[in-house]
């Protein structure tokens, strides 16, 4: 059986990170607060995403939208290997002038796969920032000209925004439903339709997104856990590893080491 290995590091593009992974493990339902573009290098995976069932094999390009609920399971005990580039929405929009989300969760196209490989090499090379920006624009356009905008029912948008703006705040179900003017039952139903998650699960994901950003600033993990609203560092570690396949400490070490190499280069 293959070992579990996931590494994350910054890139030449501010607001973008790369992840390289090889694992026989499954990943529970989770979200990212960034756009993700990736390539399956080995093996195969099945995933339930906000855009339906997704089955991919080596050579397939994969995408994920901000806030999209998804999981991931290998098709056999040999596991799979993949690479991802995660890009902040503001960076993606600034570079590509685009608004909306990827319509297709996976594409089987050798030309797109090669375009991704060029982008991955560029964002990993400090001397290739301009090339990286150009490759990202070209790949984004080639991936899908027919992007879609996920609509959030207006009556729950205030509750969604409140959870995103202050994930550490412990808002109750009553407080959230009061923001919408809906009964608790109708609020829960509308919220799930808009996000694919319960309010509690959405808040956990928002806290994980915040924790990830704080870790990248170099803050101690205990302070990150407290500021992001987790009960303690072990609580953060457990949920972080369940969603991202690595502990917060491993993620932090990857970032510190790679930034050190980039600054020396």
Image (cartoon, rainbow, N blue to C red):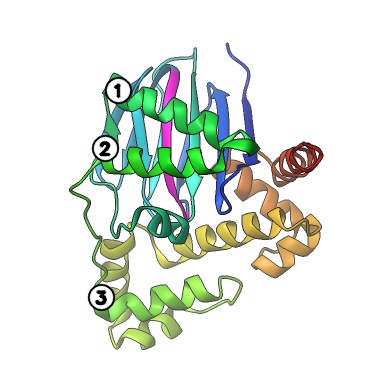
Task: Tell me, for residue 186, which label it has, or none.
Answer: 3
Earlier residue among tags 3 and 1? 1
Q: Is residue 212 left or right of residue 219?
A: left
Q: Is residue 237 depicted above or below 210 in this figure?
A: above
Marks 2/1 in contact by CB < 8 Å: the verdict is yes
Residue at x 60% of width, y 43% of height: 12
Earlier residue among tags 3 and 2? 2
Q: Secondary structure at mark 2?
A: helix
Q: Horizontal and vertical percent for residue 18?
A: 56, 38
The magenta span reads 33-41
Number of numbered labels in the structure image:
3
**On the rendered image, what quadrant is the N terminus found in?**
top right
Q: Which residue is denoted by mark 2 in the rendering?
A: 142
Q: Which residue is denoted by mark 1 in the rendering?
A: 111
Which one is nearer the viewer's eye here, 149 or 235?
Answer: 149
Res 7 → quadrant: top right
């Amino acid at each position: 059986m293959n070992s579990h290995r996931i590494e994350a590091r910054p890139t030449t593009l501010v607001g973008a990170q790369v992840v390289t992974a090889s694992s026989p493990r499954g990943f529970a339902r989770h979200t990212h607060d960034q756009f993700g573009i990736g390539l399956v290098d080995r093996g195969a995976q099945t995933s339930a995403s906000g855009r339906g069932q997704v089955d991919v094999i080596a050579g397939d390009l994969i995408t994920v939208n901000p806030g999209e609920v998804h999981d991931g399971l290998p098709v056999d005990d040999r596991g799979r290997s993949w690479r991802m580039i995660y890009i902040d929405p503001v960076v993606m929009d600034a570079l590509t002038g685009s608004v909306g989300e990827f319509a297709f969760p996976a594409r089987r196209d050798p030309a797109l796969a090669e375009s991704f490989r060029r982008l991955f090499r560029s964002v990993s090379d400090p001397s290739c920032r301009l090339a990286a920006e150009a490759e990202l624009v070209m790949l984004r356009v080639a991936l899908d000209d027919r992007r879609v905008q996920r609509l959030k029912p207006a009556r729950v948008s205030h509750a969604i925004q409140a959870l995103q703006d202050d994930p550490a705040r412990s808002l109750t179900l009553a407080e959230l439903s009061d923001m919408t003017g809906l009964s608790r039952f109708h609020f829960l139903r509308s919220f799930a339709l808009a996000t694919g998650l319960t309010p509690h699960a959405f808040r956990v994901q928002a806290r994980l997104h915040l924790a990830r950003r704080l870790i990248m600033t170099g803050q101690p993990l205990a302070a990150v856990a407290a500021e992001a609203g987790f009960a303690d560092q072990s609580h953060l570690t457990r949920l972080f590893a369940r969603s991202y396949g690595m502990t917060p400490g491993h993620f932090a070490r990857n970032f510190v080491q790679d930034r050190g190499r980039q600054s020396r280069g």
